[in-house]
Amino acid sequence: MSIHVAARNDDVYDRLESSVRSYCRDYPRSFAKASGSTLFTEEGDEYLDLLAGCGALNYGHNHPRLKEELMAYVMADGLAMGLDLHSQAKSRFLEAFERCVLAPRSLDYRVQFCGPTGANAIEAAIKLARKATGRRNVLAFTNGFHGCSLGALSLTANGHHRAASRSLLDGVVRVPFDGYLGKGVDTALYIEKLLRDPSGGVDPPAAIVMEVVQGEGGLNEAGKEWAASISRLADEVGAVLIVDEIQTGCGRTGTFFAFERIGIRPGIVTLAKSLSGFGLPLAAVLVRPDLDVWKPGEHNGTFRGNCHAFITAAAALETFWKDDALTKRIARSSAFLASELEKIAGRKGARVRGVGMMIGLDFGSSEVAAAVKRKCFDNRLVVENCGPSDEVLKLLPPLNILESDLKRAVSIISDAVDAV
Ligand code: PLP
């Protein structure tokens, strides 16, 4: 089978693509192929990929089993787009999700399929929490990131993203995440005081929206006790705890959901990014049954039935989440990464941040972080920065990355840090 690839013409981007494009500015090559943890440029140069579709490729590029299942499904004329019709692909996904994710964790959620992006899932989640509680106000955290559509953006803290819509972003009260005011200050106590005080000035919230590990915001981990306090407080004040697992989910922090480590039961959970396992657009909102107060079709949308994504998502769950092999592998790779990054950090006065396979180096300087990222790219490693001022080098390797590739990635980062 031959694939037509348009002749290379970089000028086409300057002429035709909006100036909003971003990743391509940091990694200015044209990529043609990808396999596992490797990207191949049009010229055939290889790059190790620790960006992994910004966490949308937890099982790497073009995983052979997922690809085979998708190809077989397409070749058999399987339904490609299905609105929210019943389909073989959707039932297979739902059954796999129940068998591999919900049942082993004794979780009782209904699955709402929304539009295919993370922001779509967040929009649905906050709308549902507002409808279920009859309240408007939502609490969101400093350094939180939840997407760029208007409702999601009202929760997102980053000023760069908020700027164009600032005057329209309402209905949200910003509260300090764990550690925001320094180690000695328990911000959960402050939030509790605000909500319990009839004169605290904060209306009873419909929801508290939390990332257990803040991805874009700088790899900030919520302490176990702190997150458990926020969960308890949400229950006590009649708010829905929405845990955003769009970046942390599908194994990124070591367990399928990051909230598992804390032992909490959110009312609503959002998933997207790696849910399809193949980089196909698919998002879902997990809803505790008593909160599933939607009327049929009330939160509608055309693209809520991406059958190709259902097929790869089911195959990914059946491949990676039927037993604990991946979890053990993540634990080994994370331990290796953490200890190697500690050594590098020690040489440069940086700090290791993050959990599991979303881990990185906080240089406390956007210039240093940018220089390290550039140097890594010069040496054929794609890795990104995050944090309020992009001062953190963020590693998001595929969870099944080969040990040899991980070692090579660490060595490139080490050399880059020494060179800047
Ligand atoms: N929530 C979190 C935690 C994210 O990291 C992101 C994207 O990075 C989103 C929501 C938004 O997802 P999307 O870019 O698919 O809209």
Image (cartoon, rainbow, N blue to C red):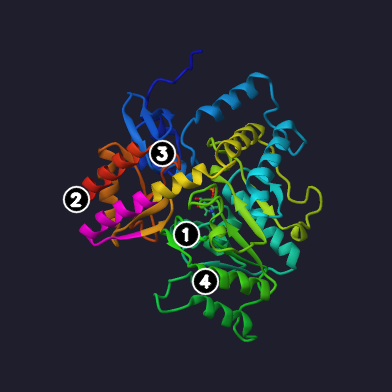
Identify the residue under disc 2: 418
Asked if residue 206 is among those painted magenta in the image, a careful observer would answer no
Asked if residue 344 is among those painted magenta in the image, a careful observer would answer yes
Q: CA distance from mark 3 to mark 2?
A: 24 Å
Q: CA distance from mark 1 to mark 2?
A: 27 Å
**Which residue is located at x 36 percent, y 39 percent?**
403
Give the residue type at disc 4: Glu
In terms of sequence position, does the residue under pointer 2 or pointer 4 come before the other?
A: 4
Give the residue type at disc 2: Asp
User: Relative to 94, is 245 on the left or the right?
Assistant: left
* Label 2 crowd (10 A; few <14 / some 14-19 / many >=20): few
Q: Nearer the viewer, residue 94 or 263?
A: 263
Say above or below: 158 vs 3: below
Magenta extent: 335-352
**Which residue is located at x 70 percent, y 35 percent?**
92
Q: CA distance from mark 1 to mark 3?
A: 23 Å
